[in-house]
Amino acid sequence: MHQTLPLPQCSPVRQPVARPFKRSLPTLLAGLALSLGLVAAAPVVAQTAGPVSFALLGDVPYGLAEEPQFDRVIRQINSSRSVQFVLHSGDVKQGAERCDDAVLQRRFDQFQRLARPFIVTPGDNDWTDCHRANNGAYLPTERLARFRQIFFPVPGQSTGGQVLQAVTQAATPGFETYVENLRWQMAGVTFATVHVVGSNNNLDPWTGIDPADSYTSPRPDRIAEFQAREAAALSWVDATFDAAIASNSAGVLVAIQANPLFETASTAQSRQGFNRFIDKLRARALAFRKPVLLTHGDSHYFRVDKPLTAPVAPSGNAMLENFTRLENFGTPSIHWVEVTVDAQDPNVFGVFQRIVPGNLFPR
């Protein structure tokens, strides 16, 4: 039987040197009230020893029609006595849904019904694709700043019904804007979220607001965003594995949003946004030698496989056996995955599908 909530073993959170956006008045007032003791803080997860588990989901809910089904998912997760926290792989809205503040806030409010800590990594539907006319023809970087403001109100802390303290990359000089890149340790394992999104990691053109934007003649601001965030992601992968080695972690979990197209040739245009991330992940996993689990959403196809290869002597490639990919359910399959974490198990990670009966077809 899984035991209850252990306290994440992580460094104290340092506040970033500079904020990438201004806090809204309600957020500032809420923070002031909390610091003055005028409102009750969410409880920090309590420390215990032994194996834990967490809920993995993503690509839900897609529109108002799916909110009742997602409420069933929330109720099932809340009823679990073993789930430690909830990890969402991004895409909190559908690709044709508007990116308005009200939509993002509505989704955030629904996630706050989760009794456990809630952690999300942004998806392409959440900001990259907001240039589309049916999304509101927003400037994607403006929407990313707003997403960060809503979903990461306190850098280094989860939201949800309980607080999980984590290390945020925003505390690292030079990476102050990347509040979404988090790292924490529990049950002898190191966890991290890394901001890698679909739409070719934002290399797909923003044609909804700029018909002239293209792969051959890209907007400078789009390329600048991609390059800066890619540098942050690569640095955060290194920092995650360095922390795992320093703490003698039994395993590493890296959570992203994008399907990085492992099966696609590295020369393909559609994989150019992921090549350096894949190369970095391969190199660090190969050197780490212990179990590494990559979780993602994006293609809405539940699977567990081993898609990475590594060079072997004298020539050729072989499966990288200590690396596993797990993709969560996604709409229209509105369910969740329970992942167990046990440092005493040679595999470290266990994967169990959790089907929500009320969400089975036909509905």
Image (cartoon, rainbow, N blue to C red):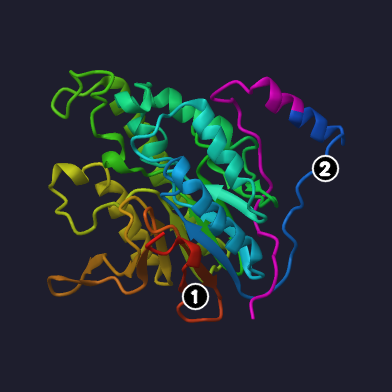
Label 2 sits on residue: 40
User: Taking 211 as reference, is 238 above or below it?
Assistant: below
User: Taking 312 as reference, is 252 above or below it?
Assistant: above
Taking the spot 58% from the left edge, 37% from the top edge, the residue there is 152
Q: Residue 348, which numbered label? A: 1
Q: Quadrant of the N terminus?
A: bottom right
Crowding near pointer 1: few (<14 within 10 Å), some, many (20+)?
Answer: many
Q: Residue 279, which numbered label? A: none
Where does the magenta region start and end?
1-29
Out of 95 and 319, give the one closest to the viewer.
95
**Amino acid under label 1?**
Val
Residue 346 x, y percent position in the rendering: 47, 81
Q: Quadrant of the C terminus?
A: bottom left
Q: Is residue 213 left or right of residue 90?
A: left
Residue 279 x, y percent position in the rendering: 28, 54
Crowding near pointer 2: few (<14 within 10 Å), some, many (20+)?
Answer: few
Taking the spot 55% from the left edge, 66% from the top edge, the residue there is 189
Taking the spot 51% from the left edge, 33% from the top edge, the residue there is 104
Out of 175 and 110, give the one closest to the viewer.
110
Let me know if residue 306 is in the magenta part. Answer: no
* Prevailing secondary structure class for the magenta stretch in the rendered image: loop
Q: Earlier in the sequence, mark 2 or mark 1?
A: 2
Taking the spot 21% from the left edge, 46% from the top edge, the residue there is 271
Q: Is residue 200 left or right of residue 238?
A: left
Let me know if residue 19 is in the magenta part. Answer: yes
Out of 201 and 308, give the one closest to the viewer.
201
**Amino acid under label 2?**
Ala
